[in-house]
Amino acid sequence: MVEYMIIIITMLVIYFVLVRNKPRVKSDWETLPLVGEYLKNKKAQNDQQQTICVHCGNDEIIEKPLKDKKENPEQTKFYHTCTKCRVILWRNEK
């Protein structure tokens, strides 16, 4: 009987240490850089300090809201996309 209790306690400890203590996986929105991190990239700014796309050089960037109701219930999270190559460049929250 004692052996079974030791096995059960060991399994519970392993469960709580390995399974329950994992860090939360970042969402796709959270993996995008903030605007400050994006601007640190020297290719992202031209001489007039106007933000440009590092992929195609276009300076037209639009802001789109994050549409996921579960991740953005208050509609305060946005991402910025290049209008020419349609690459998502950075995120922000208002």
Image (cartoon, rainbow, N blue to C red):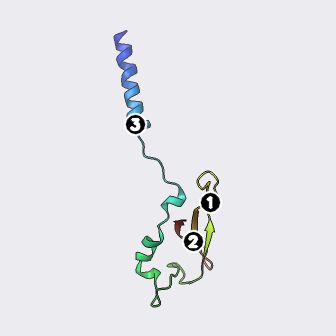
Q: Which type of secondary structure does the marked residue at label 2 adopt?
A: strand
Q: Which residue is drawn at 53% across and 67% down?
A: 91
Mark 1 lies on residue: 75
| Pair 2/3: label in front | 2
Amino acid type, mark 2: His
CA gap, disc 2 and disc 3: 37 Å
Look at the picture and state if 69 lies above or below 76: above
Whether residue 59 sits left or right of residue 16 in the image: it is right
Work out which quarter of the rendered image holds the N terminus and state it: top left
Q: Mark 2 points at which residue?
A: 80
* Percent position of residue 72, x then y: 60, 56
Q: Do the residues labelled 1 and 3 touch (CB within 8 Å)?
A: no
Apparent side of residue 71 relative to residue 4 in the rendered image (left or right)? right
- Tell me the mark number nearer the camera, choosing from 1 and 2: 1
Residue 89 percent across, percent down from the top left? 53, 71
Decide which of tag 1 and tag 3 comes sooner along the chain.
3
The quarter of the displayed image where residue 78 is located: bottom right
Looking at the image, residue 1 lies above or below residue 23: above
Within-10-Å neighbours for mark 3: few <14, some 14–19, many 20+: few
| Residue drawn at the location 47% of the way across and 68% of the way down | 34
Quadrant in which the C terminus appears: bottom right
Q: Which of marks 1 and 2 is nearer the N terminus?
A: 1
Q: To which residue does mark 3 refer? A: 18
Give the distance between the C-alpha atoms of the residues marked 1 and 3, in whole angstroms: 34 Å
Image point 61% across, 56% down: which residue?
A: 74
SS at circle 3:
helix
Residues at marks 1 and 2, CA–CA distance in whole angstroms: 15 Å
Q: Which of 52 and 36 is in front in this view?
A: 36
> In front of the other: label 1 or label 3?
1
